[in-house]
Image (tube, rainbow, N blue to C red):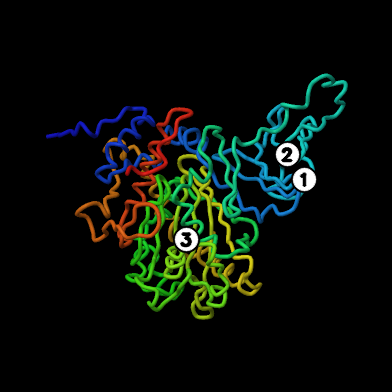
Amino acid sequence: MTTTNPQHESSAAGWTADEVLHKLDDGLPQGEIPAALFGNADVYDRELRSVFGRCWVFLGHESEIQAKGDYVLRRIGEDNFVVVRDEDGGINVLFDACRHRGVQVCRSDSGNTSHFRCPYHGWTYNTKGNLVGAPLWRNAFGGMSKEGNGLSPAAQVASYHGLIFATLDATAPSLEEYLGGMTWYLDLVFGLNSDGIEVLGPPQRFVIDANWKSGADNFSGDDYHLGTLHRSVWEIGAFPVPFRENMLGYHVQASPGHSLSFSMAPTEDEPGPKFFGYPEDLAATFDTSRISEHQLNVARRSRVFVGNVFPNFSILALPMTEDGSSHPPTGILTIRTWQPKGPGQVEVWNWFCAYKNMSPEQKERTYRAGLGTFSMGGSFEMDDTEPWITVSRTGRSVAAEVLDFSLNYQMGMPGVGIAKQVDDWPGPGIAYWTRYEEGVQRNLFSFYSRMMQAAPGQWPDLRFPE
Protein backbone atom coordinates (compact mmCIF):
# COMPACT_ATOMS: atom_id res chain seq x y z
CA MET A 1 0.00 0.00 0.00
CA THR A 2 1.32 3.44 -0.94
CA THR A 3 0.48 6.55 1.05
CA THR A 4 1.05 10.13 -0.03
CA ASN A 5 1.40 13.36 1.87
CA PRO A 6 -0.05 16.40 0.07
CA GLN A 7 2.59 18.56 1.74
CA HIS A 8 5.26 16.67 -0.20
CA GLU A 9 4.08 17.82 -3.61
CA SER A 10 6.52 19.81 -5.75
CA SER A 11 6.48 20.99 -9.34
CA ALA A 12 8.65 19.17 -11.85
CA ALA A 13 10.66 22.34 -12.42
CA GLY A 14 11.36 22.88 -8.72
CA TRP A 15 10.13 25.56 -6.38
CA THR A 16 10.14 29.22 -7.36
CA ALA A 17 11.60 31.86 -5.07
CA ASP A 18 8.08 32.95 -4.11
CA GLU A 19 7.20 29.39 -3.08
CA VAL A 20 10.33 29.03 -0.94
CA LEU A 21 9.74 32.41 0.71
CA HIS A 22 6.13 31.50 1.41
CA LYS A 23 7.33 28.34 3.15
CA LEU A 24 9.86 30.41 5.10
CA ASP A 25 7.17 32.79 6.31
CA ASP A 26 4.88 29.90 7.29
CA GLY A 27 7.64 28.02 9.11
CA LEU A 28 9.50 30.76 10.99
CA PRO A 29 6.88 31.24 13.74
CA GLN A 30 7.33 27.54 14.56
CA GLY A 31 11.12 27.69 14.21
CA GLU A 32 11.26 25.92 10.84
CA ILE A 33 13.15 26.99 7.71
CA PRO A 34 12.90 25.28 4.30
CA ALA A 35 16.16 23.55 3.42
CA ALA A 36 15.75 24.79 -0.16
CA LEU A 37 16.63 28.28 1.06
CA PHE A 38 20.28 27.15 1.01
CA GLY A 39 20.35 25.88 -2.57
CA ASN A 40 17.43 27.03 -4.71
CA ALA A 41 18.69 28.79 -7.86
CA ASP A 42 15.62 31.03 -8.22
CA VAL A 43 16.04 32.19 -4.63
CA TYR A 44 19.68 33.01 -5.32
CA ASP A 45 18.81 35.13 -8.38
CA ARG A 46 16.32 37.08 -6.26
CA GLU A 47 18.97 37.59 -3.55
CA LEU A 48 21.35 39.33 -5.94
CA ARG A 49 18.73 41.97 -6.66
CA SER A 50 16.63 42.22 -3.50
CA VAL A 51 19.38 41.75 -0.89
CA PHE A 52 22.77 42.60 -2.39
CA GLY A 53 21.26 45.09 -4.84
CA ARG A 54 19.68 47.07 -2.01
CA CYS A 55 21.32 46.52 1.40
CA TRP A 56 24.42 48.21 2.78
CA VAL A 57 27.34 45.90 1.98
CA PHE A 58 30.78 45.95 3.63
CA LEU A 59 33.64 46.54 1.17
CA GLY A 60 36.81 47.17 3.17
CA HIS A 61 38.55 49.26 5.79
CA GLU A 62 39.90 52.77 5.36
CA SER A 63 43.38 51.62 6.43
CA GLU A 64 43.55 49.66 3.15
CA ILE A 65 43.40 52.88 1.12
CA GLN A 66 45.28 55.40 3.27
CA ALA A 67 46.99 57.46 0.54
CA LYS A 68 45.44 59.42 -2.30
CA GLY A 69 45.13 57.12 -5.29
CA ASP A 70 45.09 53.93 -3.21
CA TYR A 71 42.43 51.49 -4.39
CA VAL A 72 41.13 47.96 -3.82
CA LEU A 73 38.81 45.89 -5.99
CA ARG A 74 35.80 44.54 -4.11
CA ARG A 75 32.36 43.05 -4.76
CA ILE A 76 28.72 43.80 -4.16
CA GLY A 77 26.94 40.54 -4.88
CA GLU A 78 28.77 39.15 -7.89
CA ASP A 79 29.73 42.57 -9.32
CA ASN A 80 33.15 44.26 -9.09
CA PHE A 81 33.54 47.74 -7.62
CA VAL A 82 36.65 49.88 -7.27
CA VAL A 83 37.02 51.39 -3.80
CA VAL A 84 39.43 54.31 -4.24
CA ARG A 85 40.63 57.36 -2.32
CA ASP A 86 40.58 60.36 -4.64
CA GLU A 87 42.92 63.36 -4.82
CA ASP A 88 40.78 65.24 -2.29
CA GLY A 89 40.90 62.40 0.22
CA GLY A 90 37.34 61.24 -0.41
CA ILE A 91 36.36 57.60 -0.80
CA ASN A 92 34.56 56.55 -3.97
CA VAL A 93 32.95 53.22 -4.83
CA LEU A 94 32.81 52.86 -8.63
CA PHE A 95 31.21 50.14 -10.74
CA ASP A 96 34.10 48.50 -12.59
CA ALA A 97 32.68 48.86 -16.10
CA CYS A 98 33.71 51.31 -18.82
CA ARG A 99 30.89 53.57 -20.05
CA HIS A 100 31.82 52.88 -23.67
CA ARG A 101 31.38 49.09 -23.89
CA GLY A 102 31.17 47.90 -20.27
CA VAL A 103 34.72 46.51 -20.18
CA GLN A 104 36.42 46.05 -16.81
CA VAL A 105 38.83 48.95 -16.27
CA CYS A 106 40.56 47.84 -13.04
CA ARG A 107 42.88 44.87 -13.63
CA SER A 108 44.54 44.53 -10.23
CA ASP A 109 43.16 43.63 -6.81
CA SER A 110 44.84 46.68 -5.23
CA GLY A 111 47.34 49.43 -5.97
CA ASN A 112 47.85 53.15 -6.33
CA THR A 113 46.98 55.17 -9.41
CA SER A 114 45.85 58.55 -10.67
CA HIS A 115 43.70 57.12 -13.48
CA PHE A 116 41.91 53.99 -14.66
CA ARG A 117 42.21 53.25 -18.38
CA CYS A 118 39.98 50.86 -20.29
CA PRO A 119 42.11 48.37 -22.27
CA TYR A 120 39.60 48.17 -25.13
CA HIS A 121 39.37 51.72 -26.50
CA GLY A 122 41.41 53.68 -23.98
CA TRP A 123 38.71 55.67 -22.24
CA THR A 124 40.36 57.09 -19.13
CA TYR A 125 38.84 57.97 -15.75
CA ASN A 126 40.24 59.75 -12.70
CA THR A 127 39.88 58.55 -9.12
CA LYS A 128 36.53 60.31 -8.80
CA GLY A 129 35.29 58.24 -11.71
CA ASN A 130 35.10 61.20 -14.11
CA LEU A 131 35.84 60.59 -17.78
CA VAL A 132 38.93 62.70 -18.51
CA GLY A 133 39.93 61.59 -21.99
CA ALA A 134 40.11 59.04 -24.80
CA PRO A 135 42.40 58.52 -27.81
CA LEU A 136 41.72 60.84 -30.79
CA TRP A 137 39.04 62.59 -28.81
CA ARG A 138 38.41 65.41 -31.28
CA ASN A 139 37.91 63.08 -34.26
CA ALA A 140 35.98 60.40 -32.43
CA PHE A 141 33.90 62.31 -29.88
CA GLY A 142 34.35 66.02 -30.53
CA GLY A 143 31.21 67.79 -29.38
CA MET A 144 30.21 65.05 -26.90
CA SER A 145 30.24 66.03 -23.25
CA LYS A 146 32.48 64.03 -20.92
CA GLU A 147 30.01 64.69 -18.12
CA GLY A 148 27.58 61.84 -17.66
CA ASN A 149 30.04 59.37 -19.18
CA GLY A 150 32.06 58.62 -16.07
CA LEU A 151 32.19 55.38 -14.10
CA SER A 152 28.91 54.69 -12.29
CA PRO A 153 29.19 55.28 -8.52
CA ALA A 154 27.36 53.31 -5.87
CA ALA A 155 24.19 55.12 -4.84
CA GLN A 156 25.50 55.78 -1.31
CA VAL A 157 28.85 55.30 0.44
CA ALA A 158 29.56 55.69 4.17
CA SER A 159 32.04 54.59 6.83
CA TYR A 160 31.60 53.60 10.46
CA HIS A 161 34.76 53.22 12.58
CA GLY A 162 36.67 53.09 9.30
CA LEU A 163 34.50 50.24 7.98
CA ILE A 164 33.46 51.16 4.43
CA PHE A 165 29.95 50.26 3.29
CA ALA A 166 28.04 51.00 0.10
CA THR A 167 24.55 50.44 -1.22
CA LEU A 168 23.25 50.45 -4.79
CA ASP A 169 19.83 51.66 -3.62
CA ALA A 170 19.35 55.42 -3.62
CA THR A 171 16.23 54.96 -1.47
CA ALA A 172 18.09 53.02 1.24
CA PRO A 173 18.15 54.55 4.74
CA SER A 174 21.43 56.02 5.98
CA LEU A 175 24.09 53.56 7.11
CA GLU A 176 23.62 54.39 10.81
CA GLU A 177 19.85 54.02 10.51
CA TYR A 178 20.36 50.70 8.71
CA LEU A 179 22.74 49.45 11.43
CA GLY A 180 20.35 50.58 14.13
CA GLY A 181 21.14 49.01 17.50
CA MET A 182 24.17 47.26 16.01
CA THR A 183 26.10 50.55 16.29
CA TRP A 184 26.19 50.12 20.10
CA TYR A 185 28.03 46.84 19.67
CA LEU A 186 30.32 48.05 16.90
CA ASP A 187 31.29 50.94 19.20
CA LEU A 188 32.03 48.44 21.95
CA VAL A 189 34.47 46.45 19.76
CA PHE A 190 35.94 49.06 17.40
CA GLY A 191 35.68 52.12 19.63
CA LEU A 192 37.78 50.90 22.57
CA ASN A 193 40.85 52.67 21.22
CA SER A 194 41.00 56.32 20.19
CA ASP A 195 43.43 55.45 17.38
CA GLY A 196 41.02 52.92 15.91
CA ILE A 197 41.96 49.72 14.12
CA GLU A 198 43.90 48.77 11.02
CA VAL A 199 43.92 45.67 8.86
CA LEU A 200 47.01 43.46 8.95
CA GLY A 201 47.63 42.87 5.27
CA PRO A 202 45.26 42.09 2.41
CA PRO A 203 42.28 39.78 2.94
CA GLN A 204 42.61 36.05 2.53
CA ARG A 205 40.26 34.68 -0.13
CA PHE A 206 39.09 31.10 -0.48
CA VAL A 207 36.10 29.39 -2.07
CA ILE A 208 33.81 26.87 -0.36
CA ASP A 209 31.14 24.79 -2.11
CA ALA A 210 28.49 26.18 0.23
CA ASN A 211 25.75 28.79 0.32
CA TRP A 212 26.67 32.27 1.59
CA LYS A 213 23.87 32.19 4.17
CA SER A 214 25.56 29.36 6.10
CA GLY A 215 28.35 31.75 7.10
CA ALA A 216 25.92 34.53 8.03
CA ASP A 217 23.82 32.04 9.99
CA ASN A 218 26.87 30.69 11.85
CA PHE A 219 28.26 34.10 12.82
CA SER A 220 24.85 35.37 13.92
CA GLY A 221 25.40 33.21 16.98
CA ASP A 222 25.55 29.45 16.35
CA ASP A 223 27.36 28.53 19.55
CA TYR A 224 25.73 25.13 19.94
CA HIS A 225 28.17 23.51 17.47
CA LEU A 226 31.28 24.51 19.41
CA GLY A 227 31.39 21.51 21.72
CA THR A 228 30.97 18.98 18.90
CA LEU A 229 32.43 20.31 15.66
CA HIS A 230 35.24 22.27 17.38
CA ARG A 231 35.90 19.91 20.27
CA SER A 232 39.52 19.49 19.20
CA VAL A 233 40.12 23.22 19.76
CA TRP A 234 39.68 22.66 23.50
CA GLU A 235 41.71 19.44 23.42
CA ILE A 236 44.78 21.21 22.01
CA GLY A 237 44.47 24.22 24.33
CA ALA A 238 43.75 26.77 21.60
CA PHE A 239 40.93 28.42 23.58
CA PRO A 240 41.23 29.15 27.32
CA VAL A 241 37.61 28.92 28.51
CA PRO A 242 35.97 25.50 29.18
CA PHE A 243 33.03 24.76 26.88
CA ARG A 244 30.28 24.94 29.49
CA GLU A 245 31.59 28.24 30.82
CA ASN A 246 31.94 29.52 27.29
CA MET A 247 28.21 28.95 26.73
CA LEU A 248 27.44 31.44 29.51
CA GLY A 249 26.57 34.75 27.93
CA TYR A 250 23.99 36.47 25.80
CA HIS A 251 22.41 36.21 22.38
CA VAL A 252 21.29 39.60 21.12
CA GLN A 253 19.04 40.56 18.24
CA ALA A 254 20.56 44.03 17.93
CA SER A 255 18.02 45.19 15.36
CA PRO A 256 16.13 43.53 12.50
CA GLY A 257 18.59 41.36 10.55
CA HIS A 258 21.66 42.08 12.70
CA SER A 259 22.49 39.51 15.39
CA LEU A 260 25.36 38.73 17.75
CA SER A 261 26.54 36.61 20.64
CA PHE A 262 28.69 37.28 23.71
CA SER A 263 30.48 34.66 25.78
CA MET A 264 30.64 36.55 29.03
CA ALA A 265 31.64 36.08 32.64
CA PRO A 266 28.67 36.58 35.00
CA THR A 267 30.59 39.29 36.93
CA GLU A 268 33.71 41.40 36.44
CA ASP A 269 35.43 39.50 39.27
CA GLU A 270 35.28 36.13 37.51
CA PRO A 271 38.66 34.61 36.58
CA GLY A 272 39.56 34.21 32.94
CA PRO A 273 40.11 36.50 29.95
CA LYS A 274 38.77 40.03 29.87
CA PHE A 275 38.35 42.42 26.92
CA PHE A 276 38.23 39.48 24.44
CA GLY A 277 41.55 38.16 25.71
CA TYR A 278 43.75 41.14 24.83
CA PRO A 279 46.92 41.56 26.93
CA GLU A 280 46.43 43.51 30.14
CA ASP A 281 48.97 46.19 29.15
CA LEU A 282 47.01 46.80 25.95
CA ALA A 283 43.64 46.79 27.73
CA ALA A 284 45.02 49.46 30.08
CA THR A 285 45.36 51.80 27.08
CA PHE A 286 41.77 51.44 25.92
CA ASP A 287 40.14 54.87 25.79
CA THR A 288 37.03 53.88 27.63
CA SER A 289 35.83 57.49 27.79
CA ARG A 290 34.57 56.98 24.24
CA ILE A 291 32.01 54.38 25.32
CA SER A 292 29.43 54.25 28.10
CA GLU A 293 29.86 52.59 31.47
CA HIS A 294 27.47 49.87 30.33
CA GLN A 295 29.55 49.22 27.20
CA LEU A 296 32.73 49.20 29.27
CA ASN A 297 31.26 46.65 31.67
CA VAL A 298 30.19 44.37 28.80
CA ALA A 299 33.59 44.66 27.08
CA ARG A 300 35.49 43.94 30.30
CA ARG A 301 33.46 40.78 31.00
CA SER A 302 33.52 39.58 27.40
CA ARG A 303 35.45 36.53 26.32
CA VAL A 304 33.99 36.16 22.83
CA PHE A 305 32.11 38.51 20.53
CA VAL A 306 30.69 37.10 17.31
CA GLY A 307 28.16 38.86 15.13
CA ASN A 308 26.77 39.40 11.65
CA VAL A 309 25.68 42.64 10.01
CA PHE A 310 23.04 41.71 7.46
CA PRO A 311 23.55 40.46 4.89
CA ASN A 312 27.12 39.11 4.81
CA PHE A 313 29.54 41.03 7.07
CA SER A 314 30.75 39.09 10.11
CA ILE A 315 32.94 40.03 13.08
CA LEU A 316 34.75 37.86 15.62
CA ALA A 317 36.83 38.88 18.66
CA LEU A 318 38.16 36.27 21.10
CA PRO A 319 41.33 34.87 22.69
CA MET A 320 43.04 32.21 20.57
CA THR A 321 46.43 30.61 19.98
CA GLU A 322 47.71 28.57 17.06
CA ASP A 323 50.00 26.59 19.38
CA GLY A 324 48.94 26.16 22.99
CA SER A 325 52.19 24.47 23.93
CA SER A 326 54.29 27.48 22.89
CA HIS A 327 52.06 30.56 23.12
CA PRO A 328 49.22 31.48 25.48
CA PRO A 329 45.98 32.64 23.86
CA THR A 330 45.78 36.30 22.90
CA GLY A 331 42.97 38.49 21.60
CA ILE A 332 42.32 38.34 17.87
CA LEU A 333 39.92 40.42 15.78
CA THR A 334 38.85 39.11 12.40
CA ILE A 335 36.27 40.54 10.02
CA ARG A 336 34.96 38.77 6.95
CA THR A 337 32.42 38.75 4.16
CA TRP A 338 30.58 35.84 2.61
CA GLN A 339 30.72 36.71 -1.11
CA PRO A 340 28.05 34.87 -3.13
CA LYS A 341 29.23 32.96 -6.19
CA GLY A 342 26.05 31.08 -6.99
CA PRO A 343 23.56 29.09 -4.90
CA GLY A 344 26.23 26.48 -4.13
CA GLN A 345 29.44 28.50 -3.76
CA VAL A 346 30.73 31.23 -1.48
CA GLU A 347 34.04 33.06 -1.52
CA VAL A 348 35.23 33.96 1.96
CA TRP A 349 37.13 37.26 2.30
CA ASN A 350 38.90 37.29 5.66
CA TRP A 351 40.81 40.20 7.24
CA PHE A 352 42.79 40.22 10.48
CA CYS A 353 42.70 43.51 12.38
CA ALA A 354 44.66 45.11 15.19
CA TYR A 355 44.29 48.21 17.31
CA LYS A 356 46.69 50.77 15.90
CA ASN A 357 48.51 51.35 19.18
CA MET A 358 49.46 47.68 19.56
CA SER A 359 53.19 47.04 19.52
CA PRO A 360 54.70 45.31 16.46
CA GLU A 361 55.16 42.21 18.60
CA GLN A 362 51.51 42.22 19.68
CA LYS A 363 50.37 42.65 16.08
CA GLU A 364 52.56 39.76 14.96
CA ARG A 365 51.24 37.58 17.78
CA THR A 366 47.57 38.31 17.09
CA TYR A 367 48.10 37.79 13.34
CA ARG A 368 49.75 34.40 13.81
CA ALA A 369 47.11 33.31 16.31
CA GLY A 370 44.44 34.24 13.77
CA LEU A 371 46.16 32.47 10.90
CA GLY A 372 46.32 29.24 12.86
CA THR A 373 42.65 29.26 13.84
CA PHE A 374 40.38 31.42 11.67
CA SER A 375 41.95 31.33 8.21
CA MET A 376 42.10 29.29 5.04
CA GLY A 377 44.24 26.70 6.82
CA GLY A 378 42.99 27.36 10.35
CA SER A 379 41.54 24.74 12.66
CA PHE A 380 38.09 26.37 12.83
CA GLU A 381 37.79 26.82 9.08
CA MET A 382 38.62 23.21 8.33
CA ASP A 383 35.95 22.14 10.81
CA ASP A 384 33.19 24.45 9.53
CA THR A 385 33.48 23.97 5.79
CA GLU A 386 32.47 20.30 5.62
CA PRO A 387 29.06 20.75 7.32
CA TRP A 388 28.30 23.87 5.25
CA ILE A 389 29.06 21.98 2.03
CA THR A 390 26.47 19.36 2.92
CA VAL A 391 23.91 22.00 3.98
CA SER A 392 24.14 23.42 0.46
CA ARG A 393 23.97 19.95 -1.09
CA THR A 394 20.79 19.24 0.87
CA GLY A 395 19.38 22.64 -0.04
CA ARG A 396 19.55 21.99 -3.77
CA SER A 397 18.49 18.35 -3.59
CA VAL A 398 15.36 16.98 -5.23
CA ALA A 399 14.58 15.06 -2.05
CA ALA A 400 14.46 18.25 0.05
CA GLU A 401 11.76 19.65 -2.23
CA VAL A 402 9.77 16.45 -2.75
CA LEU A 403 9.77 15.72 0.98
CA ASP A 404 9.14 19.38 1.88
CA PHE A 405 12.17 19.05 4.15
CA SER A 406 12.51 21.79 6.77
CA LEU A 407 15.32 22.62 9.20
CA ASN A 408 14.83 22.96 12.97
CA TYR A 409 15.55 26.43 14.36
CA GLN A 410 13.50 26.05 17.56
CA MET A 411 16.21 26.38 20.21
CA GLY A 412 15.29 29.08 22.71
CA MET A 413 11.61 29.24 21.75
CA PRO A 414 9.12 29.03 24.65
CA GLY A 415 9.41 25.62 26.26
CA VAL A 416 12.53 24.66 24.31
CA GLY A 417 15.86 24.64 26.18
CA ILE A 418 17.09 26.76 29.08
CA ALA A 419 17.61 30.14 27.36
CA LYS A 420 15.29 32.89 28.53
CA GLN A 421 14.71 36.45 27.37
CA VAL A 422 16.10 38.98 29.84
CA ASP A 423 14.91 42.49 30.63
CA ASP A 424 18.04 43.89 32.29
CA TRP A 425 20.41 43.78 29.31
CA PRO A 426 22.03 47.24 29.09
CA GLY A 427 22.31 47.43 25.28
CA PRO A 428 19.72 47.80 22.54
CA GLY A 429 17.82 44.89 21.08
CA ILE A 430 16.30 41.65 22.34
CA ALA A 431 18.63 39.63 24.60
CA TYR A 432 18.63 36.04 25.85
CA TRP A 433 20.70 34.28 28.52
CA THR A 434 22.37 31.78 27.87
CA ARG A 435 23.77 31.02 24.44
CA TYR A 436 21.69 27.86 23.93
CA GLU A 437 19.40 29.82 21.62
CA GLU A 438 18.58 30.34 17.92
CA GLY A 439 16.48 33.50 17.97
CA VAL A 440 19.49 35.31 16.54
CA GLN A 441 19.22 33.19 13.39
CA ARG A 442 15.45 33.58 13.26
CA ASN A 443 16.04 37.34 13.36
CA LEU A 444 18.41 37.02 10.38
CA PHE A 445 15.91 35.07 8.28
CA SER A 446 12.91 37.16 9.29
CA PHE A 447 14.54 40.33 7.97
CA TYR A 448 15.90 38.40 4.98
CA SER A 449 12.36 37.38 4.03
CA ARG A 450 11.07 40.94 4.27
CA MET A 451 13.93 42.29 2.13
CA MET A 452 13.38 39.57 -0.46
CA GLN A 453 9.71 40.52 -0.78
CA ALA A 454 9.93 44.31 -0.40
CA ALA A 455 8.75 46.34 -3.37
CA PRO A 456 11.31 48.64 -5.06
CA GLY A 457 11.70 51.85 -3.09
CA GLN A 458 10.08 50.34 0.02
CA TRP A 459 12.01 49.15 3.07
CA PRO A 460 11.04 46.86 5.94
CA ASP A 461 10.75 48.41 9.37
CA LEU A 462 14.24 48.79 10.85
CA ARG A 463 12.96 48.72 14.41
CA PHE A 464 11.43 45.97 16.47
CA PRO A 465 7.76 46.38 17.39
CA GLU A 466 7.25 48.13 20.74
Q: Dot 3, how many residues are within 10 Å of its Cα: few (below 14), some (14-19), or many (20+)?
A: some
Q: Position of residue 265 (x, y in %)?
A: 37, 71
- How many numbered marks appear? 3
Residue found farthest to the top:
143
The answer to whether any part of residue 180 appears in the image is yes
Q: Position of residue 451 (x, y in %)?
A: 42, 36
Q: Position of residue 42 (x, y in %)?
A: 43, 32
Give amino acid for label 1.
Glu
Asked where in the image residue 461 lies, by quadrant, the reply is top left
Q: Which residue carries the number 2 mark?
A: 128
- Report the Cα–Cα distance between label 2 and label 3: 41 Å
**Which one is in front, 15 or 187?**
187
The answer to whether any part of residue 389 appears in the image is no
Give amino acid for label 2.
Lys
- Report the Cα–Cα distance between label 1 and label 2: 8 Å
Q: Which residue carries the number 1 mark?
A: 87
Q: Please report whichever mark, 1 or 2, sits nearer to the chain's N-terminal start.
A: 1
Q: Position of residue 201 (x, y in %)?
A: 65, 60
Q: Which residue carries the number 3 mark?
A: 382
Q: Is residue 345 left or right of residue 285?
A: left
Q: Secondary structure at mark 2?
A: loop
**Which one is in front, 202 or 308?**
308
Which residue is found at the position 26% from the left and 50% from the top? 410
Q: Decide: is 367 above or below 454.
A: below
Marks 2 and 1: in contact by CB < 8 Å? Answer: yes
Q: Please report whichever mark, 3 or 1, sits nearer to the chain's N-terminal start.
A: 1
Q: Please report whichever mark, 2 or 3, sits nearer to the chain's N-terminal start.
A: 2
Of labels 3 and 1, the one closer to you:
1
Q: Decide: is 86 above or below 366.
A: above
